[in-house]
Image: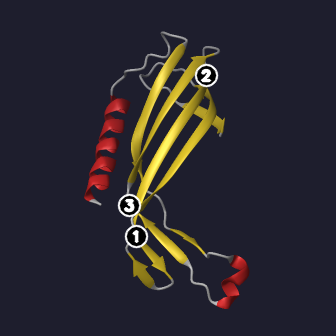
Amino acid sequence: MPFLKKSAYLCSLGMVTILLCDVIQADEHKAYVQLNAGAVFAPTNSFTPNTALSSNGLPKITFGYDPGYATGLALGYHLAEQFRLEGELMYQVNAFDNVFVGSFENHFKGERMRAAVLLNAYYDFKNQTPFTPYITAGVG
């Protein structure tokens, strides 16, 4: 799927551009908005249709995924000088075009989509450089 591969590379380029541009000035404002985009490389996924019957010879099904993309939107707020809290929505897509049933390859086309809702907390280590290291924890 050349279109999806091109889309994944363009998303990666967009993410690097966003990271290199100092667009968000979270120190000047208490609230901030963060946009995320990037490429997603999903691992191969395998399963047996019914584990209770797997001893009866049902084959394992394996999906091979193409590179995909992920996008996200986060809304955050500085609660203190070094502590921030944010909520994030994330969406991810990976296409597949080959499925192995046992040792036979079938060419099905489809997509794996995922969405997530996250709550993240950050502690920023303020210093005199243009970079601010931080630690984070989150649930989702």
Q: Is residue 40 left or right of residue 125?
A: left
Question: Which-is-in-front pick, marks 2 and 1?
Answer: 1
Name the mark on residue 66.
3
Instruction: Give the spatial CA distance, label 3 vs label 2.
Output: 35 Å
Mark nearer the N terminus (3 vs 2): 3
Q: Is residue 96 left or right of residue 90?
A: left
**Residue at the right extreme of this rendering:** 52
Residue type at mark 3 is Asp
Please state the horizontal and vertical placement of residue 129, each as a whole percent of the image.
Answer: 44, 22
Please state the horizontal and vertical placement of residue 34, each as a whole percent of the image.
Answer: 47, 26
Mark nearer the N terminus (1 vs 3): 3
- Can you say whether 99 is above or below 22 in the image? below
Q: Nearer the viewer, residue 50 or 29?
A: 50
Callout 1: helix, strand or loop? Answer: loop
Q: Please tell me which residue is depicted at 62% across the width and 89% down the height of the picture.
A: 57
Q: Nearer the viewer, residue 93 or 110?
A: 110
Query: On the image, which quarter does residue 46 sit in?
Result: bottom right
Label tally: 3
Q: To which residue does mark 2 refer?
A: 84
Callout 2: helix, strand or loop? Answer: strand
Query: Quarter holding the C terminus?
Result: top right
Give the colour scheme shown: secondary structure
Label 3: few (<14), some or many (≥20) within 10 Å? many
**Residue at the top extreme of this rendering:** 28
Please state the horizontal and vertical placement of residue 134, each as a whole percent of the image.
Answer: 56, 30
Label 2: few (<14), some or many (≥20) within 10 Å? some
Name the mark on residue 62.
none
Mark nearer the N terminus (2 vs 1): 2
Residue type at mark 1 is Phe
Name the mark on residue 108.
1
